Amino acid sequence: MKPIVTADEAVKDIRDGCSLMVAGFMGCGNAFTLIDALVRKGTRDLNLITSDTAYPEVGVGRLICQNRAATLIASHIGTNPVSGQKMNSGELKVTLVPQGTFAERIRSKGAGLGGVLTPTGRGTAVEEGKQKLEIDGREYLLEKPLGADYAFIKAEMADRYGNAWLPAATKNMAVVMAMAADHVILEAEKIVEPGELDPDRVTIPGIFVSTIVKSELPAANLQQKA
């Protein structure tokens, strides 16, 4: 059985300067309850890894607007103007990574690989400082694995063993992030007993989950907030 704790208890060990992955896209699939708890705790200087920064004060966007992040690795920040403002002012160090490369770097970490070879980014700013390899006459960039101290994952349903079901787009980046983080905190809207979650619906096996937290807001409110 995995420990089931409050959101405040789950984030108490996330210190200033930790690296944090947040799954989801445009706020969809973000762990709102955990993010709110982290803002309450006051953790700062996070090294944030997320596909995008959602919208101002929505989901992962709150960590940007509340000045909780020192660095950001993401693929898209255009829907949150605060991210762009902080990047341009130098307040937030931003590294933009093509989304496919972003996913593969995280998957590489979880799979124990040394990196991924990709032609994406050749001839652009993306290739700066990266090793290049030529294979069968074609040039590739070596993109190194990307992991984190913690990951926030949002599930619609989880059992007490940590097996989780994430429907549709809410699973964006969630599976690879669950594999690549040292400590995975799973926020679930519904927690059921072992055997109540159909094994065919398991998106993330419980072996990757460290701690479970019950969402504090019902699904309808989460969707409205997003």
Image: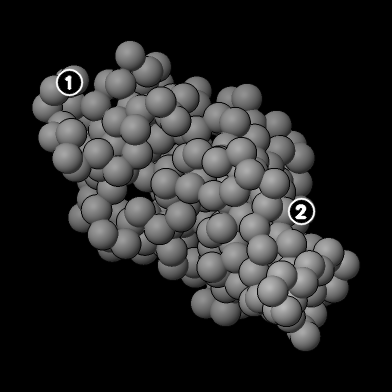
Q: Secondary structure at mark 2?
A: strand
Q: Position of residue 10 (x, y in %)?
A: 50, 26
Q: CA distance from mark 2 to mark 1?
A: 39 Å
Say which residue appears at 62% left-offset and 55% top-offset: 105
Left or right: 88 as drawn, with respect to 118: right
Left or right: 60 as drawn, with respect to 126: left
Q: Position of residue 5 (x, y in %)?
A: 40, 21
Snapshot colouring: one colour
Q: Where does label 2 land, which residue?
A: 70
The image quadrant that residue 156 belongs to is: top left
Q: Is residue 64 visible?
A: no
- Between residue 140 and residue 63, name the one nearer to us: 140
Quadrant that contains the C terminus? bottom left
- Image vertical order of residue 27 relative to residue 80, above or below: above
Q: Position of residue 174 (x, y in %)?
A: 43, 49
Q: Where does label 1 land, which residue?
A: 193
- Between residue 185 and residue 37, name the one nearer to us: 185
Q: Position of residue 69 (x, y in %)?
A: 70, 53
- Between residue 112 and residue 14, name the one nearer to us: 112
